[in-house]
Image (spheres, rainbow, N blue to C red):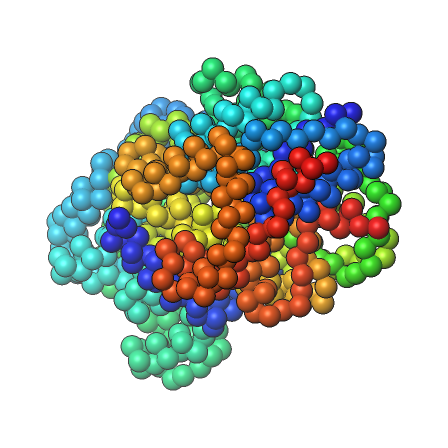
Amino acid sequence: MLSSFAAKFNTRATRLTADLEHRAKIRSALRSYEKARDEKKALFQDWEAARDGAATIKWEAVNHLDAYLVRFVEKLEARGTKVFWASNAQEARDYIVALAKEKGARSIIKSKTMTSEEIHLNDSLRQAGYEVVESDLGEFIVQLREEAPYHLVFPAMHLTRTEISDLFHEKLHSAPTDNPEQLTMIARRELRLKYLRADIGISGANFGIAETGMISITENEGNARLTTALPRVHVALMGIEKVIPKLSDLALFLPMLATAGTGQQITCYNSLIGGPRQPDEPDGPAEFHLVLLDNGRTQLLADAEQRDALHCIRCGACLNVCPIFRNVGGHTYATTYQGPIGSVITPHLRGLMDWKHLSYASSLCGACTEVCPVKIDLHHHLLHNRRNAVARNPDRWERFAFRAFARLTANPGLLDKLVRLSRPFLPLVRAARQIMPPPIKGWLASRELPAIALRSFRNYWKSR
Amino acid sequence: MKITLFVPCFVDQLFPSVGISAVRIFEKLGHNVDFKESIICCGQPAFNAGYWDEARGIAARVLKALSGQDPVVVPSGSCGAMIRNFYPELFKNTPEAEAAAQLARRTFEFSSFLVDQLGVRDLGSRFPAKVTFHDGCHGLRELNVKRQPRQLLEHVRDLTLLEMEDQTSCCGFGGMFAVKFPMISTAMGETKAASALETGAEYLVSNDSSCLMHLQGLLSRQKQKLKTIHLAEVLASS
């Protein structure tokens, strides 16, 4: 039985894979990224050694998360940060909505944070009556379209300039243009007003540095800097796995994230925030709240086999090389985190039986694992999720089929005879493909069946 | 040297000439080839589908049949990776763990065995055609086989190797994936087939017949002239 999530995935995947325009669009959108990524990778003295180093640091942090988180929080609190530990999405949302109420806020500006997508923060804030505006250009665009980000780094990569221009024309009444600078200026004019009006700025965090008690934010548009500096109150939402031990670790992680994520040597802006405005400082927010989110992460931490999935720095490199992602598109997943990393962790965050289909929707090609800068064993974890799903609740028909097959392989001679006997029926199968069971029908929809050899290898061997 | 050839089920039944070519190549090099008639499948279909108990049942028979010290050669990166990389995981914490690790160490993919173990590059073969090469993902990423097939093709007389765009991207076969998600598998295959066609090659060569079965199925349906052929068959030509 397919879960309703799996059925929807199949429907959307069927539509998108047949959409050749979509396929070409994603391919061309990623082509410039691929070129830039490879150029910047080549600037590393040894990219593979950098991956090893990053994986080692993340391993250390994740395996001693208890200690590093406490150190991180102590430093932040010492400088007046209010830290809230949220066990789940509900607690995080409730805290932020209550804070908005307490501050008498009306308008909230946000910089890019996938963690807020994970907890559906915008919906809660809007339902509570607040205006919420995304300030990252890509996020701003998908927010205007009232849809989820398509890609965890490139939220609007599925849209052409013309589509964005049409959207701006419709929603913001701007003059049509396909000039990227002009499109950016339209969004910027709109956003500048929102920054000034906003009572609260909400950001994510790319890294949390335990040694100094700071969050690190990586961006290219300066919007996160404005979001975290202009409003009276700054709220940062951060998954607990984002903590790293030392400030100097950023010397590796900032260029690595930029290289793997966007093909840049380093992103245009990198900010370190260690608390609200201090008594001797002239500006910055009066209050800084940090919401630390668990939301299933400690469950993943308890799984020694897949714990390395918590290494993820959300660079999106695995999506960009994934042939599944490139053909079905980001929205088909219907998850916060798309692509291979999403297929690995969503079953942990939102339930294995509802989301196991994503682990099966893979050819296990391993391109994701090959590029992951922090060396998450992504495609093998898809295998682990499959094994765990079967252990919990096997499909009875499938199990019967594999048991029958296992039995048959004990007698290769018999299997050989059965295949030979089926040989004359192949043309019949081809002709009657519409009424064949799904596996055969699925194969024959686009492919011819291979011919069955007149004489098998084992027959040849016997007759030698 | 005595070499045990492991012939995967689909090669045995659908593409026997791949196995026969491998036998001829090893015999030409003066080696003794052995084949175990008591086994037919490595268990990967069940393993990949998550049915590890069923896979273990199949794999246990392979372990038994392939006991000893002889190298085991598999003309498929995928089944090779199953034995070499995944058997140790499948048999972890079982009485067969040591046997699985021991078999894994002496199991090799066909082209890497020729180049890295036997030190052979030139087999005296001749194949007068333009070809392009597709790396099966399991061979490529599980077993790091990339240069070996190309080193072998370089020494084939009258053969021109034309590399395709995105040469290391997956063809979309993926075992059960091909029939569980035929629309995604097909889209991937179409992209791969288009890259291969763009090279103008007459043959699409690979070290994995499973990828070729999928790609040939697509190409035949599209009535393309491009033909698929296994590396062993190319190397056995003269």
In front of the other: B77 or A435? A435
Q: Is residue A67 above or below residue A189?
A: above
Q: Residue at x 13, y 52 (%)?
A: A101
In front of the other: B176 or A464? A464
Query: Is residue B156 found left or right of A24 in the rendered image?
Result: right
Q: Residue at x 16, y 46 (%)?
A: A94
Image x and y of residue A174, in percent: 35, 81
Query: Is residue B193 found left or right of A313 in the rendered image?
Result: right
Q: Residue at x 44, y 18 (%)?
A: B93
Image x and y of residue A223, in percent: 39, 59
Q: Residue at x 54, y 16 (%)?
A: B98
Q: Quadrant of residue A33?
A: bottom right
Quadrant for the N terminus of chain B, please: top right
Q: Is residue A148 visible?
A: yes
Q: Residue furthest bottom?
A: A175
Q: Quadrant of residue B203?
A: bottom right
Q: Is residue B117 above or below residue A40?
A: above
Query: Is residue B92 found left or right of A285 in the rendered image?
Result: right
Image x and y of residue A366, in percent: 53, 44
Q: Is residue A87 above or below residue A445?
A: above
Image x and y of residue A57, in percent: 49, 31
In front of the other: B38 or A14? B38
In front of the other: B85 or B24? B24
Query: Is residue B222 found left or right of B179 in the rendered image?
Result: right
Q: Report the label total.
A: 0
